[in-house]
Amino acid sequence: MPTSGGERIKASSFIPVSTAAVLLVGSTTLFFVFTCPWLAVTVSIYVPPCSGILFFFVLANFTMATFMDAGVLPMANEDEDKDDDFRAPLYKNVDVKGVQVRMKWCASCHFYRPPRCSHCSVCDHCVEDFDHHCPWVNNCIGRRNYRYFFLFLLSLTLHMVGVLSGGLLYILHHLEDLWKLHCTVTLVVMSVSGLFFIPVLGLTGFHLYLVSRGRTTNEQVTGKFQGGVNPFTQGCCGNLEYLICSPISPKYTARPIKKSTVRIIPPFLRPETDIQIPIIKVEDNGIQTHDIQNKRPSTDGMEEPDIQRLNTPPPLPPKPDPNVLKSHLATLEESGLHPKPVTPSPGQTLQQFRPLPQSTSKAPPPSPVHQVAVAPEQQGGSSRGHNLSSELILGRFDQLAFPSGPMSAPLQLNSLTLNSRSLTLKHAYRHGNKLPALYPEGLISHQVSPGLFPPHNPLSNRNSLSYDSLVSSGDPHYLAQRGGPPLHYHPHFMTLGHDGSVLQRPPPHTYSPVFMGVTRQSPQPRDTSPRDPSLRDLTPQALTSRDLSPQALMHRDLSQQALIHREASPVRYDNLSKTIMASIQERREMEERDRMLRMQARSQALYGCPDMGVYDIPSRRSLPADSMRLPGSRGPTPPAYGSREFMMSTGILGYGGARSPLSSASSSSLTRAPRTSSSPLQSSSSLQSKGRSPSPAYLPPDRQAQPSSSSSSASAPDAPPKMPLTHQRHGGKGLSTPVCPQIGTIESSRRVYVASHTTLQC
Amino acid sequence: MATEFHNLQELRQSPSLATKVFIQRDYSEGTVCRFQTKFPSELASRIERTLFEDTVKTLNTYYAEAEKVGGQSYMEGCLACATAYFIFLCMETRYEKVLKKISGYIQEQNEKIYAPRGLLLTDPVERGMRVIEVSVFEDRGSSGSSPSSNVSSGISQR
């Protein structure tokens, strides 16, 4: 006897089926005993056998409908939905024969219900092709047993018709003996049959209609295909054929367990395309690496201006010489830096590269060091893109011919090499004064350690355009190096940024084209020149390259370089008017300072990062306008600053904006109920999932509100170099000076870049 | 990789499950059992695209054969009806026969192709024909972690 509530419910659920069974069997038995003999005699001898067969059929179908598994889908394993549980929407759209069908997430069974599947609340499981839960058979009617249920209804209807007509015949012939036992029993049987005949007939007719339309009861009742097209119908005849003749699908539950003897023993084979680069799914950032199989580390790819948005990971150079790394690390240790491991992230676009901020040479050593450290931190942190971008840039320089020691060796980008380069960059800041003026090549590398950077000559080995630009851009840096301060680093980065891409773009600034032309035209001679002259030669080109460099790269050293230029009076400026150069320098300086200030202010506002202290620019905090800007709010989209910059900026925007997983969700913005087990995912994801219906728009700011320290530090370096001058000039965007009309756009684009970059950090 | 041959102990240890990749159903042709042949990116580094796609296409072919509404299924239905479905006690349906073939095929594929690559296919019928579960194992001897139980009972897991 049931004791608990659940059991009572179970017991009560057996009442209808018991009643139906009793009535069916009892009535039929009585009919056969009391009425059929007379019918056999009077009407035909075949009446009882046919009735018997019909009744047997009814019973068989009733039994099958009652005891057959309707097509129960087993619950999903925990592994199956761990990716979706907290982020996925409630509905998923799937296209069935051209019609969009919605698949709902089943919170009980932990999977998206296949089309036509529904969860039975009585039985608490999902049933394939769910029709309804029939209380008269106490079972769900679904894919596997619908035909039996339908045939049961049909046969029962026929049986009832037979019983009623036989009984009526009998009664009509025995009107005078109505109170005799046989008549009484027949009357009772007729009443029962007559009572249930109408509902059963109605139900049969209803299901005939459903079969003709190819719908299930569930779909009919919920009105799914009321006005639209039903993709599951095969026409009336096709549906009937499917109903009767289709093979019976297997039972999914309680299957015999098969023991597999497959042994999995490493080592494992790898595809022949052997991608040495692991595929990194950058889910948070939204960029997933595809086609990594086709990727091969190659210099060619990197030499191309592909710093623009990369959908596929760029090839990474081979691992650097461990000795080089050690030396780098040693130098970094020396400088007190903590070189953070830069993880390769082939999936990241260069856009995420955050140029290493370069303070003025006069800046205290910690500041450049810090800024340098920031970049690798970023790289090693959640933002793989930064990592990769810096790596790319570094690698580019590598390709361009950084013959300096091991750094220059690989023609291909190597993540480790890039890491070392970033380290060297960090180190470079520290040792700015010490490093030789291998500026153009090792914007980063040479700065790391003198020994690592061979003379500038190797640059000449490359005749690529990027190399040329690099060379040209290296000038001011060289000059700067001569001067001692690490100002030269700025152009390196900017040059690097260009390297892949910028140089080819028409510079946005008025002076740019001039320099561009200069830059491109005269790479080679500088190659062979001794270092000093080459440095000077590179100066104007550095300026131009700086112009062209992605905004992210530009900020740092413009000012310093401008100063350097003024100081250095490069030989190569012969083809440029000195006034132009001076103006260019001034402009760059202002730009960079402005950018730095903004970046820093913004980063501080956003992330509350401590005063980076690296750049003792007092005006940093006096940029409230920029600092107040939300990370999600990007500045005005920069104009076509240059092909690559624009692409990068737009890429960043697009990339950052599309990161919300709900943005790509199906029509509903609701999220599924998470599993009972708490999600280990980050809070941002929990916001999406637990909230059940967070708006996608809510996510980006939320994500940005949880910046990683790396991102904060990443953005910080950009800000510091901003000089008071910039601040004075920029209340907002535009500059008042006519000299640099484009600076406003540059700044805006930089802000955009940084903002998006910051966003990406989250 | 050379590191995998450090010692025999390491080799003997079973690899641990790294992740599971799920190949979802393709409902573009209705509720007929079909699986998406799209090559998942997670497997790109573990198995050749062609091999995987061949496996899925073959499975789809098997399932199409199992679900074909034709003469054999009609006869089966009539026979079942005629015997009041007692025939189901004696004989297994066509679908079940094809499922056995599929199971054998998956076993063979696992042994020949997937296990050497550190992958393991799970029969979809164990997942309600909703997904093909591909277990991806770590590509080296255990890195100190306890060996998983998937080595010899991959298909049996439920």
Image (cartoon, coloured by chain):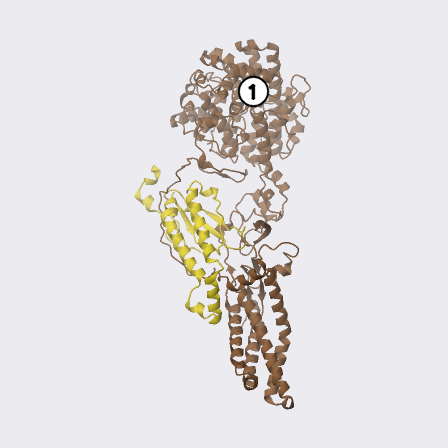
Chain colours: A brown, B yellow
Q: Residue at x 53, y 76 (%)?
A: A55
Residue in front for this viewpoint, A223 or A164: A164
Question: Relative to the observer, which residue lies in front, B59 or A717?
Answer: B59
Disc 1 sits on a residue from what chain? A
Number of marks present in the image shown:
1
| Image coordinates for residue B121, horizontal then vertical, percent | 42, 50
Q: Quadrant of residue A197?
A: bottom right
User: From what the image shows, is residue A195 above or below residue A185?
Assistant: above
Where in the figure is residue A575, as x and y percent of width and height?
A: 56, 10
Q: Is residue A358 visible?
A: no
Residue position marked by numbered label 1 in the rendering: A546
In the image, residue A739 lies at what x, y percent? Answer: 65, 16
Whether A80 is drawn above or below A709: the answer is below
Q: Is residue A330 left or right of residue A559?
A: left
Mark 1 neighbour density, 10 Å: few (under 14) some (14–19) many (20 or more): many
Instruction: Work out which quarter of the rendered image holds the C terminus of chain A and state it.
Output: top right
Please report the residue visible at 54 percent of the width from the left and 48 percent of the height from the top: A84
Please, what secondary structure does the residue beneath circle 1 have?
A: helix
Is A729 placed left or right of A681 in the picture?
right
Q: Amino acid at mark 1?
A: Arg
Can you give x and y, in whole percent of width and height, for residue A114 in the image?
A: 54, 54
Q: Could you say which is closer to the camera, residue A434 or residue A85?
A: A85
